[in-house]
Image (cartoon, grey):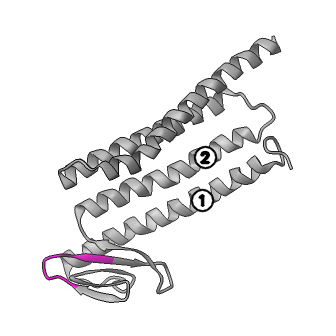
Amino acid sequence: MKIIGKNSVSTALRWLFLFLAVVTTLLFTYEMLGFGIAYYNLNSGNSLWAETFYAGHSIDWGGQVVTHPKEMFFRFLLPFSQQQLVTGSFTVTTFVYQVIGGLFLPAFCYFGYRIFRNISSDRLFTLDMICWMKRFSLLNIIFFMLVNLCYMVFVGKFSGKMLFDASLYLMMGVMVYFVALFFKKGYDLQNEQDL
């Protein structure tokens, strides 16, 4: 089986990335709905879908019930099941990190889909490919900066571990940018030969 071109591994990866983009978008939307409903229930005293989107002072965390009168916890279940989707402290910090990660992952998968869609085509060096590779690199660099900025704002101190973990996205962004420049050179050479 071929690696690039039509009916190749890149075609399978293209559809995998599209599937993951759709699934992660749906999960992010569901999670944001959960935060909205849990916040509404806490502030209004209602119990709208309270079993699915729980928020309160106690939580079942890894088989242990944790109760803290000064801290709020949340737990969102997958639809029509008892399987937890996400559990944590119900704070602004958690919400911001969930939004950043929840927006990043579908974008990451969609950009991957667009890149592999171009790799699956007959012409490898195209302006569309170069454009999506640059967007992908920019997405990773922005994610790196946002995660570290949020950590310093919410935690109030520098973390070498956080910097190291997030720097993987920075390195990936920089490497993909250089690959995009390489593809630009290939595009220019391809156009010269077509003339």
Residue 16, by quadrant, is bottom right
Whether the residues at callouts 2 and 1 have beta carbons within 8 Å, the answer is yes
| Magenta-colored span | 67-74
Disc 1 crowd, CA 10 A, few/some/many (<14, 14-19, 20+): some
* Residue with the mark numbered 2: 112
Secondary structure predominantly adopted by residues drawn in magenta: loop
Q: Quadrant of the C terminus?
A: top right
Foreground residue among 39 and 17: 17
- Residue 98: x, y in percent? 36, 60
Amino acid type for the residue under numbered disc 1: Leu
Find out whether residue 86 is within the magenta segment: no
| Above/below status of 89 relative to 174 | below
Identify whether 3 is placed above or below 22.
above
What type is the residue that disc 2 sits on?
Gly
Q: Residue furthest right?
A: 1
On the picture, is 5 further left or further right than 177?
right
Residue on which disc 1 sits: 20
Secondary structure of the residue carrying tag 2 is helix
- Identify which residue is drawn at 70% across, 38% down: 118
81 and 163: which is toward the camera: 163
**74 to the left or right of 127:** left
